[in-house]
Amino acid sequence: MYVCLCNAVSDKAIRTAVRHHQPTSFKELQRIVPVGTQCGKCVRSAREILENERESMVIFLQSA
Ligand code: FES
């Protein structure tokens, strides 16, 4: 599903970027994928996906 329509960035692209590059902030995520760089309507959803993915990684690492 597209999260950012302006830049055609999907939720999968955001999750993959978080897993591979482990950005610690939304700004850092934006250096990897061009999400939220135009109208900004997707920023809230993209931030939620970033936080959810980071939390899943922590849970995964704690259970390993
Ligand atoms: Fe992402 Fe417009 S929908 S910047």
Image: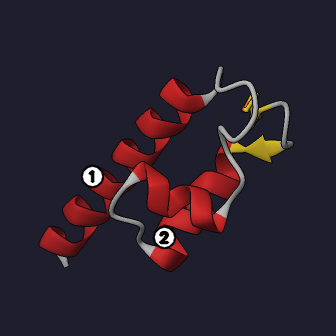
> Where does residue 25 sit, x and y in percent of width and height?
36, 56
Question: Residue pushed farthest front?
Answer: 38
Q: Marks 1 and 2, how far apart in space?
A: 11 Å
Marks 1 and 2, the one that precedes in the sequence: 2
> Where does residue 28 sit, x and y in percent of width and height?
47, 63
Residue at x-position 68% and y-position 59%: 33
Assign a secondary structure to mark 2: helix
According to the picture, the residue beneath numbered tag 1 turns out to be 55
Quadrant into which the C terminus falls:
bottom left
Q: Is 5 placed above or below 35 here? A: above
Quadrant into which the N terminus falls:
top right
Question: Residue pushed farthest left?
Answer: 62
Amino acid carrying mark 1 in the image: Glu
According to the picture, the residue beneath numbered tag 2 turns out to be 19
Q: Is residue 39 left or right of residue 25?
A: right
> Where does residue 43 sit, x and y in percent of width and height?
55, 31
Q: Is residue 2 left or right of residue 61?
A: right
Assign a secondary structure to mark 1: helix
Q: Quadrant of ligand 1?
A: top right
Amino acid carrying mark 2 in the image: Arg
Q: Is 1 placed above or below 35 here? A: above
Q: Quadrant of residue 35?
A: top right
Count the numbered circles shown.
2
Q: Is residue 10 left or right of residue 60?
A: right
Q: Is residue 1 left or right of residue 21?
A: right
